[in-house]
Image (cartoon, helix red, strand yellow):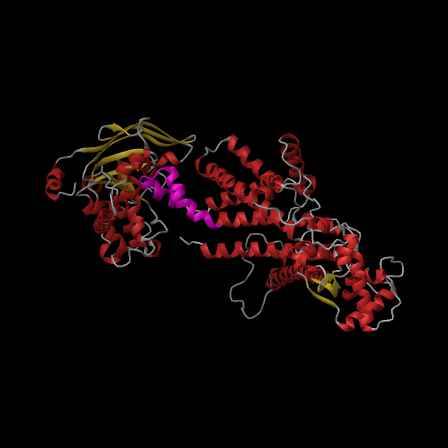
């Protein structure tokens, strides 16, 4: 009650008189408690803002991206007309191959015509306009089917074709009758036909595994694009990063932490490693371009080069976390080992390293997760390749042949014009996030699981 | 070495095990040990006493070259083990430490099983040809460490799960598993309760049969109880060295007297 003159907290003055009651708060205590409550409120507010951002982000990503996992398919019975595909009728594969995808288009037109007649639809659309509801990959799908087994010519087969991205957009609510006013790719009459086909069950929107496992597709066919091949590219890069960064990083850290003398040289190295961790990733990209591609003539766009660049980026993370976990092993363990006559290396490898392993593992996984999400250096070494083909055969081919990576693929989609690609970019982000969250969870679990107490 | 009859007879002779001549230790610019000369006898418990920071632990760590692990530490002078200079460039500290075992202030068992704690030293020194021999060494060491009866049923349990006193006896057993000739103990009881301390002291007295034991301690009662010889260190100097009884009852140096009567330290 007395102590108002003591603001600013000087040395504890004997301002409080003996015999004062504890039941009443002094002004000073009240102020102190208020300050504490205020601080707690700030903290809660800060966490709240952070959480809010996270929720907005997650809702946004899932809201925009979930659509990419489903796709609109149109089921049609196509008669594989011998007069169009194999005029000579002798099922000679070479002759059949001469028929290009253009030769297959009439079959699809015919199929639509038949469908319309069966359902007694009076859309007034020409067969060609009806066939435009399908993806441009439809003819190729037919041709692949026929070439796989020419004996099928002459039969009538039910196919599940990808719908055009506009039809797909219409199913997902992205395209409406108003929005197509200036769109030459689709007309209101075509949408009417789609409505009728939906009612009839020919047009359906279902889960599309091709988005997760498939290859990228050209600008005209967003509905066919998938992230699978770039996922493989990322996988190959991670293999390179793991195979190089882990042994190099751990060996460097063990040497620096346990063996190297502490002098100006090691100080400089230490500072440089810490600085390296803060170097913008695009710098590593241009370094990789200059050294690995221009100087060493490694192939452009190859996961090997991407992996090498990401190794450079990941090394500081791994070294720093490895050194930290080596440091956290109590020196008494080293003393104990040295005391019974172990050599320094034995002490490190038999005792210190096993104790530091969970920390090293965690650091490595986090470093890998970082590398997995890295985009900028990949742009510089050309790992934004348009890879429409499927998986490479074999690990060696996988490392050396051009590929893309998940974040680069997402970037690539995001900058394409068609809004259908925009949706795929969000979908790709969901897949990337699933990987990152899995890796980070794994790191946390490993740390918890192997944490030792001494 | 374990022949008690021979040990008893050896007790009578005062054979020098370690002799230090003009030992100086520097930590960077700090002169931590100044001109220490001491003869440590075989089959004897020698206690190093002195106030904190007087250099007794530093000197102890010189005796098995544990100071080598500290970059800025520099040792000059000669330390002879059985007449051989342990700081000779030809001497590998690893081999030396197999001969001169060490027990630390804080019990520091490896976070492994009790069995592996003991077996580690013999394994890396190749003392056992097979599992049976190793088992034998482990049992013998644990018995000599006076902890066998308490742990014989749980050799696979982690050494870190034992109580503090048990851990320290485990560490002593680990140190003697490699059959050293000298056992250095750096305040082995400072982290233990009185009962565990008594057990360890009893053990030290038994170890005297076979080893030269050097023990650093802050407890003068402990020094008086377990040691035959006592060295008093003060500010890096070895002030006085002699029979324990004499140091505690009739010290020659006034500083020693002040310390043991509690006036400095």
Range of the magenta residues? A331-358
Which residue occupies the foreground of this view, B21 or A207?
Answer: A207
Q: Is residue A343 magenta?
A: yes
Residue A304 drawn in magenta? no
State which quadrant residue B259 falls in: top left
Name the residue nearer the viewer: A375 or A82: A82
Which residue sits at x=49%, y=39%? A253
Locate residue B124: give its quadrant.
Answer: top left
Q: Is residue B248 left or right of residue A428?
A: left
Q: Main secondary structure of the magenta part?
A: helix
The front one of A125 and A372 is: A125
State left or right for residue A173 relative to residue A393: right
Residue A418 seen in render = yes
Residue, x 21% and y 51% (percent of image)?
Answer: B143
Expressed as whole percent of the image width and height from the top left, the position of residue A108 reads 78, 60
Q: Is residue A225 visible?
A: no
Q: Please provide percent x and percent y for residue A337.
A: 35, 43
Residue A33, position as x, y percentages in the image:
60, 63
Q: Nearer the viewer, residue B101 or A405?
A: A405
Q: Quadrant of the N terminus of chain A?
A: bottom right
What is the count of numbered marks?
0
Residue A199 in picture, x, y percent from top left: 78, 73
From what the image shows, is residue A59 above or below residue A453?
A: below
């Amino acid at each position: 009650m007395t102590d108002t003159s003591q603001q600013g907290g000087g040395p504890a003055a004997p301002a409080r008189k003996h015999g004062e009651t504890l039941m009443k708060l002094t002004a000073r205590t009240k102020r102190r408690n208020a300050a504490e409550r205020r601080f707690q409120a700030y903290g809660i507010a800060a966490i709240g803002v952070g959480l809010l951002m996270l929720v907005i982000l997650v809702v946004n990503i899932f809201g925009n991206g979930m659509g990419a996992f489903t796709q609109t398919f149109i089921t049609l019975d196509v008669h594989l007309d011998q007069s169009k595909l194999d005029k000579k009728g002798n099922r000679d594969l070479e002759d059949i191959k001469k028929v290009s995808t253009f030769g297959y288009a009439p079959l699809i037109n015919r199929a639509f015509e038949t469908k319309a007649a069966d359902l007694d639809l009076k859309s007034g659309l020409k067969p060609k306009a009806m066939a435009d509801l399908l993806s441009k990959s439809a003819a190729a799908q037919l041709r692949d089917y026929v070439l796989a087994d020419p004996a099928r010519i002459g039969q009538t087969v039910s196919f599940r074709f990808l719908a055009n991205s506009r039809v797909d957009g219409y199913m997902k609510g992205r395209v409406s009758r108003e929005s197509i006013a200036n769109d030459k790719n689709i007309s209101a009459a075509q949408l009417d036909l789609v409505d009728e086909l939906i009612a009839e069950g020919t047009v359906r929107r279902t889960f599309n595994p091709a988005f997760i496992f498939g290859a990228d597709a050209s600008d005209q066919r967003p509905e066919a694009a998938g992230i699978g091949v770039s996922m493989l590219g990322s996988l190959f890069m991670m293999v390179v990063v793991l195979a190089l960064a882990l042994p190099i990083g751990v060996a460097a850290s063990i040497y620096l932490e346990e063996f190297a003398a502490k002098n100006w040289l090691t100080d400089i190295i230490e500072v440089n490693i810490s600085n390296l961790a803060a170097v913008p990733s695009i710098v590593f990209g241009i370094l990789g371009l200059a050294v690995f591609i221009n100087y060493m003539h490694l192939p452009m766009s190859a996961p090997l080069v991407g992996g090498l660049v990401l190794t450079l980026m990941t090394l500081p993370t791994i070294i720093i976390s490895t050194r930290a976990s080596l440091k956290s092993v109590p020196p008494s363990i080293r003393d104990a080992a040295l005391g019974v006559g172990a050599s320094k290396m034995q002490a490190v490898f038999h005792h210190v390293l096993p104790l530091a392993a969970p920390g090293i593992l965690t650091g490595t996984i986090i470093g890998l997760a970082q590398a997995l999400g890295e985009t900028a250096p990949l742009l510089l070494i050309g790992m934004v390749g348009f890879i429409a083909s499927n998986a490479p055969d074999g690990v060696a081919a996988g490392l050396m042949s051009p590929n893309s990576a998940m974040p680069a693929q997402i970037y690539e989609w995001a900058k394409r014009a068609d809004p259908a690609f925009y949706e795929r970019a969000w979908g790709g982000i969901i897949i990337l996030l699933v990987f990152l969250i899995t890796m980070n969870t794994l790191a946390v679990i490993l740390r918890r699981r192997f944490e030792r107490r001494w | 070495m374990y022949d008690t009859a021979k040990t008893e007879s050896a007790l009578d002779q005062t054979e020098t095990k370690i002799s230090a001549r003009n030992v100086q230790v520097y930590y960077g610019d700090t002169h931590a040990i100044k001109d220490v000369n001491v003869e440590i006898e075989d089959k004897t418990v020698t206690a190093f006493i002195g106030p904190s920071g007087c250099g007794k632990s530093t000197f102890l760590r010189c005796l098995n070259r544990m100071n080598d692990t500290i970059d800025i530490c520099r040792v000059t002078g000669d330390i002879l083990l059985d007449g051989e200079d342990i700081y000779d460039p030809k001497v590998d500290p690893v081999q030396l430490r197999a001969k001169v075992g060490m027990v630390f202030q804080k019990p520091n068992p490896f976070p492994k099983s009790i069995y592996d704690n003991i077996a580690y030293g013999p394994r890396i020194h190749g003392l056992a040809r097979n599992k049976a021999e190793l088992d034998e060494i482990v049992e013998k060491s644990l018995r000599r460490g006076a902890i066998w009866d308490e742990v014989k049923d749980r050799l696979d349990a982690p050494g870190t799960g034992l109580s503090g006193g048990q851990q320290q006896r485990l560490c002593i057993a680990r140190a003697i598993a490699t059959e050293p000739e000298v056992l250095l103990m750096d305040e082995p009881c400072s982290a233990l309760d009185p009962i565990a301390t008594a057990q360890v002291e009893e053990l030290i007295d038994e170890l005297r049969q076979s080893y030269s034991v050097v023990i650093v301690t802050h407890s003068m009662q402990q020094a008086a109880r377990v040691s035959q010889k006592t060295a008093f260190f003060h500010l890096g100097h070895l002030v006085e060295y002699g029979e324990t009884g004499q140091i505690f009852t009739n010290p020659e140096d006034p500083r020693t007297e002040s310390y043991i009567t509690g006036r400095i330290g």
